[in-house]
Each structure stands twice: as structure tokens, then as C-alpha cells.
Image (cartoon, coloured by chain):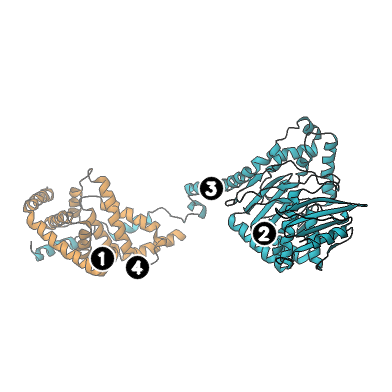
Chain colours: A cyan, B orange
Amino acid sequence: MKENQLQLLFESARSVPTELSLEQVSNTILSFPAVVRKPWFKKINLNTFLMTTSLIILTTAAIILTSQNEASNNSSEIHQIIDIERLDISDRKLSLINPEVPNDIILTSPERDSIFLYEEPLNSEIKGSVLSDTNTLNELNATYERRHFISYREVEEKDIILNTNQAKSLQKMLEDWVEEDELGSWRSGMIKVQYHPEYLVINSDTLNGAILNKYRNLLFQYNITPGINRHIFSSRKYIMAGDFIDGNFRGSVLGKLMRVKITNRPGYIKQGTHEKRKVILHITDFETTNQKFKDATFIDTKMQNEPEAIRTKSDPISKSQLKDLHTEIVSLFKSYGLKTKGHFKYAISFDQSTLELRQRTLKQNQKRELINLLEDYNIRLNDNRLLVLNDYGIMLVEQTGSDTNSFQSWIKSGHIFNITGSDLREIEKSFLRHN
Amino acid sequence: MMHNTKQEDFMKAYESCHERFLRYCSSLAFGKMDVQDLVQDILLSAYSKFDQIENKDELLHYLIRAARNRSISIWRKRRDLVDLKELHRQKLADQGVSPETILDIQLLYSMLNKLPQKQKEAIILFEINGFSMKEIAAIQNSSEAATKTRISRGRNKLAELFSENPDLNLKEVFVSLKSVML
């Protein structure tokens, strides 16, 4: 077909009148129903509404359930504690009828939002009432041990869980800050922190004011809240942060493990001396291990030996303790610049009021540090004792009346103290003469 | 009244589109569907969405696109049910169109239906409805050059179809003559 023939066909199609006239279309348009704009609520699709509502409900439920699960994970272990506490406080009879409490109940302190007791410390009235309940139960010879009842405060605390990086970071921060704030020399061996709800003690200094807030904030950054039995021990080799409860440690450790002795006496981390008979509350003996706990290992090491009674005046200090004391004093004196090779021979005398290093004059803070160290080993100022030491050994001597008793000595092999004398002064001279 | 005003506005916009829109619908619907149904469907749709058409000058483009889509939709549903060629022939005859013209138109639409959809659409819009290349390109969302090429190829294809199917032409002519004469 030729182009012009095709154009003729198109021309035919163009010439045909439209099937509907404009008038017909107008009538059609006018016949449309009076379309009124839909009200806004009719634009809401029921399906969309239902889907949106369902989505909101599901999301909300998921959030609530997730938070509940987190809470229940943590609280599942403490239901018993909570129940027991309820029984303790409100229903003593019931607690006495069913005195079987799992032994590990004290070890499963819950992780939950803590009450920041340093903001609003528990006042003495509340504390008193809790303890009075406890005493009443004890008087009734309840099977529970006292510690179960004093755990009232403990359930408010968060367990200390540090991962490796956090532990290292805290170790470094404490090292820097303690040195900067002159709260004790890092070289002296160890930083000791006691973080009680009502006070914060670092190396025997009770903090207050701005410096107190500074350290609280630091610890808060590591989720460390105050606790009755909460301590941090840090040296270059290790850091331990946690709760020391009846010979058990609960917390995080990084580095070479160590032996720790603590009392619950405010301001000191040492053996308690203010009670006639008192167990050494917290001993964790890891000294033979060099194990490093991996990332935030949560340990619960029970004391290997039974708690030992704090020695009375008549009890001799053990050889192993004396050895430890020697090591610590040497370390301390090194930090003071008192340790030079071949000239380490010192006698430390102390009576009821003071301590004196015969050969050198100690600064006041050094003297306090040495007193604290000795008290850690139950060697008190009022014991009227003499401590002599050199590179090779240490000896503790006590004079009672006219008698002079050598408590104990620890001597490295091959070196023997040959010290005699009727009083401390003679012994001291004799020791200093001895090479 | 709001809706009366809307009808007036719609009518005002529609008047300029009427001729070309109706011719396009007739081209699409010939032998396949009732033009009035198609037009009514499209107008109702356009009227309900008239508020959403920002530029009222583009109503024609909207109507053309709607007609194309609607015709395809209707044709898919009804292709096996009805053959409306007879009806359309009758309507044209009623309007005073000569039997020769009706025959030409019928042949033309038969061949156009054998073209690809876009080619057919472009040729109808250009040759029968008188749209410019630019307008067709806008309706088909393509460039003017592509539209030009499409129309050119469509014309060539149409010429080939007419040349290749003389029997069809004779048959179609016979059927048309029969219907017109009777």
C-alpha cells in the first residue's frame, strides 16, 4: 500500500464524527453523583488502622517483655532472698518454721538497679531496726546465720563485673589518681579502697568533699556501687574488686591473684582488733596461682581454710605471716628510699602511743602507713613490741613485765639471728650489731 | 455548592479535550468495547480525581492515558465474550457515515490492532487525533525522537500489513459491505 492510500484511510478516520457529542458527555458528567469530599475520618482505612494498632501493641509488648525478661533473669536467683527477707521482717514465725535456707543464698546477690546509698545513706534508725530484727532471731536460736539477715542491704547492691579492659582501665586510673591526690604511694605495694555506703576509704584516708565525689564518680563509671563488704585492691600485678563475705569473694579479678585480709572496721583493711573474738572475715588465698581470669570472669572462691580467729596477745604470729610482713616492709621501705643494698638493718619499736624507726626519721604519713601495715598483721601499738629486720629475716619481740619473749622469727636459709638480751633495747643493739 | 462548582470546572477543562479524547476512545474501542462505557468510566475516574490534577491543562493527557489503560483492562476481561464490530458499524451508519468510509475505518482499525501497543497508540494519536510529536512524547513518557521513530515504523508496518493480507482485506470488505447493505 502506498503512503497516500494510507493517508486516505487516516483521513477517513479523522472525518468520522465522534460517537458521543459534547452535549452527551456534559449530561453524563452532570449525572455523576454529587461527589462530596470525603470527611477526614472516612479517609482512614480500617485495615490500616488495625495494622497500625496491632503493630503498636506488639512493639509495646515486646519492649515490656524484654525488660521483664532482663529483670527476671537477674531476679530469678534472688526470689528466695527476697522471700526470706520478707519473712525475716514481717513474719518471723514463718521464718522459724522453715529455716532451711540454701547455703549459697548469700552468694547470689542480684544484679538490679541499686539505690545509690552515698546520695542518701541509710540512716542509723533503719540500720538499727534491721539489726534488731536480726538479733531477735539470733536470740531465738534461729537456724539462719546472721549473715542471711544482714544481707538486707546487699540485695540493693550490684555485683561488680569488670571485663579485662575495664579492670585495666580502673587499675590505671586508680594508680594515677591516688598518686596525684597523695593518698598513698603506688610503690608502697597496693591501693586499698573500701567503698562503704557511708564512707569511702583509700589507703586508710577517709575521703570527703570534692575528692570524695571525684572517686565516687570514677567508680560509678565502672558500675561500682557502694556496699558493706565492698573493696578494691589494686597493684601493678592485679586488681580485685568485689565483695568479701565470710571468706568468700565475689567480684572480678584481673592479674596475679593474691591473699587479702580485711576487716569490716571502717577505714582499715586489715584484721579487726576491736572485738574480743572475731573471725578474719575475708580471706581469699590465691597466692600460689598465677592465673589470669579471662574477661569478666565472675568468681566465687570459697576460702580454703576455716576462718581463723584473730590472735589474742598471747598468740604468736605465724612464720608465714612474718615472712609476708618482711616482704611488705621491705617493699615499703624501698618506696621510701630506705632500702639500699647491704645497709638494710632496721629496728622498729612501738609502744602504746607511737612507732619509731630507730635509724631514720619517718614522715608522718610514712609512719601512719607503717602502722597500718603492722595492724594488718595484728601488731598493735599498745603491744610494747620491737620488730627487727634486715635483708635476711625479721623478728618480732615482745616484752611483758620483766620477761622478754621472742614471738616468732622468720629467717631465710643460711642466716641465723643470734640475738640475746633482757630488754628490747638490748635486743635491738644486739640485732644491729649482728650482720 | 461545592460539587456544582467542581462540575463546572471539570466541564470547562474538558471542553477543549472532547474532540480528540472521543476520537481516541473510538479508535481504541472499535470492535472491542462500547465507546460510551469506556468514556463514562474514564470521565468518572477523572472527575473524582480532578482535584488532584494540579495543572488542568493536562487533563487531556490524563484522559488519554486513562483511556489506554482502561481499554486494555476492559479488553482483557471481555475479549472472548463480545464482538462489537457490528455494533460500531451500525452506529457509524446511523450518524450518516458512508459505507465506503465505514469500510476504510474498519480496515484501518483491524490493521492497527496488529501493531504493537505503543506504535498503535502513537499512530492513532498522531494521524487520527492530531496530537503533536511533543504531546505524544509526553503522554508516552518518551522523547520526541523516539516517538517520531515509533510513528515512522508504525506507518511502515501498517503498509506492510495491508500489502501482506489482501485476502483479509477482501474478506473484511465483504463483511462490511454485507452489513452496510443489509
- Decide which of B1, A268 is in the foreground and name it: A268
Q: Position of residue A128 (x, y in %)?
A: 84, 47
Label 2 Cα crowd, 10 Å radius (few <14 / some 14-19 / many 20+):
many
Task: Point out the frontmost of discs 4 and 1.
Answer: 1
**Element at label 3:** helix
Residue drawn at the location 36% of the way across and 62% of the way down: B11
Label 1 Cα crowd, 10 Å radius (few <14 / some 14-19 / many 20+):
many
Question: In the image, which disc is placed on residue A53?
Answer: 3
| CA gap, disc 2 and disc 1 | 85 Å
Task: Point out the frontmost of discs 1 and 3.
Answer: 3
| CA gap, disc 3 and disc 2 | 58 Å
Q: Residue under mark 3: which chain is it in? A: A
In contact (CB < 8 Å): disc 3 and disc 2: no
Label 4 Cα crowd, 10 Å radius (few <14 / some 14-19 / many 20+):
few
Indicate the quadrant where residue A133 lies: top right
Q: Are marks 3 and 4 on the same chain?
A: no
Residue underneath mark 4? B57
Question: The residue under label 2 is which amino acid type?
Answer: Ser
Q: Are marks 4 and 1 on the same chain?
A: yes
- Decide which of A235, A163 is in the foreground and name it: A235
Q: Is residue A201 above or below residue A157?
A: below
Q: Residue under mark 4: which chain is it in? A: B
Task: Point out the frontmost of discs 3 and 2.
Answer: 2
Q: Position of residue A102 (x, y in %)?
A: 70, 35
| CA gap, disc 3 and disc 4 | 42 Å
Can residue A217 be seen at all in this image of the molecule? yes
Residue underneath mark 1? B136
Question: The residue under label 3 is which amino acid type?
Answer: Thr
| CA gap, disc 4 and disc 2 | 85 Å
In contact (CB < 8 Å): disc 4 and disc 2: no
| CA gap, disc 4 and disc 1 | 15 Å
Is tag 3's residue or tag 2's residue first in the polypeptide sequence? 3
